[in-house]
Amino acid sequence: MIYPVDISTQPVWTILSNIMDPEVPVLSILDLGIVRKVTVNDDDVEVVITPTYTGCPAMDMISASVRMELLAAGYKNVSVLQVLSPAWTTEWMSEQGKKKLKEYGIAPPNPLQQVCHHDLFMNDEAIQCPHCESWHTRLISEFGSTACKSLYQCKDCQEPFDYFKCH
Amino acid sequence: MSLLNYSLSLADSTLLLGQRNSEWCGHGPVLEQDIAITNISLDLIGQARNFYQYAAIIRNDGSTEDTLAYLRDAREFRNLLLVELPNGDWGSTILRQFFFSNYQHLLYTKLQQSNDEQLAAIAAKALKEVTYHLRWSSEWVIRLGDGTAESHRRMNDALQELWPYTGEMFIPVPFEKEIANKQTAPDPGSLKDAWMEKTAEIFHAATLDLPGNVFMHTGGKEGNHTEHIGFVLAEMQFLQRAYPGAEW
């Protein structure tokens, strides 16, 4: 069976793939998995995005960037809609995005199921050091430099590093 | 009307606790925990924004999230009294966060099933964050309660101070009863047993005793506040009052 593909949205997806997350500038908003839907009608575009965390201060800036880039590309009416449901999860991050994170020095999120538990004083399962690839690391704080990261340290190379925590 | 009041009530409680916690910015006991409590602030203020945005849509009178947060006076705020109290020391801040996160975790778990799509979406989104808050604050209650003689004494003092403000979470006001009857939100009273159970579990590990029955302060959800709210609003609303409409 052949499914129709809406090729009219392809140029928009290409533009979006070049818009970076202002707080983790190696990740595009597509790598992050926050673009949920694109609708194109001649010169009108609607882009639906969802926040990573409720209080993420980058969302307004991302909305503005999407608008500006699409207007610059010649679309006349651009609307950027923020939706909450279904809630974003790190499972939506692309494999390419995870690779880029690691190269940037941030440990990418582990697969979801193993981590988000309630047990007190239990560490997440091993997080790999993005610098020396050792699994011998320790959690310093569950809350890090941005809402989406926690702080770890490698016990082998001693380097502290951010972990993009599972969510 | 009950949906509006309910949304405002959730917005006001999360905003005020976010504001109170943010007072720790630059003053936390150690850098990592300073960052933790301010991260929690950010999440709470994000939740408040979602509830205010929704309330503004319901009001449909030109209100925005900003006018609702910055241009209403104390009597119009519907937050729990617990969250407007001054921070006290680190132990007191932690204990309040634990009480509130414990409550939020139960509330949002049920609110995800709301027949109101937007409340359900906000709750499902926020629940993931609250899970982190509950875990973090539980660990700190245990660490400090079962810590040194000094930290244990301080946690006990905080407990005596804060406990009489915990009952309000579970005593419904008319708009909460109304919205519970419509299956839009859980009856606050239905959360109490699970909340007590979790609190007892953490207190046991923290070597803290559950207080007996004491008088519980109420009124916040209906606009009758403690003297402290005036001070926190004065600081939080100053800029918009002095320079109306100011933006970044």
Image (spheres, coloured by chain):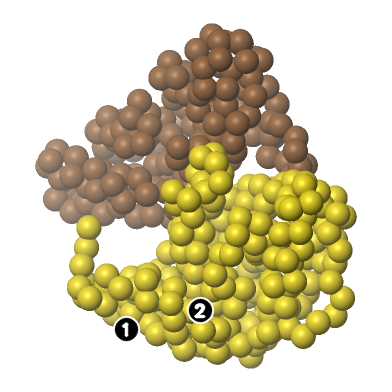
Relative to B207, A100 lies left or right: left
Q: Nearer the viewer, residue B25 or A103?
A: B25
Q: Nearer the viewer, residue B63 or B72?
A: B72
Tell me the tag on residue B228.
2
Q: Colour of chain A?
A: brown
Q: Residue at x 30, y 44 (%)?
A: A62
Q: Can you say whether A167 is above or below B241 in the image? A: above
Q: Can you say whether B218 is above or below B83 in the image? A: below
Q: Can you say whether B43 is above or below A135 in the image? A: below
> Helix or strand or loop: what does disc 2 sit on?
helix
Q: Nearer the viewer, residue A54 or A135?
A: A135
Q: Chain of mark 2?
A: B
Q: Nearer the viewer, mark 1 or mark 2?
A: 2
Q: Residue at x 77, y 63 (%)?
A: B156
Amino acid type at circle 1 is Asp
Task: Return the residue at label 1.
Answer: B61
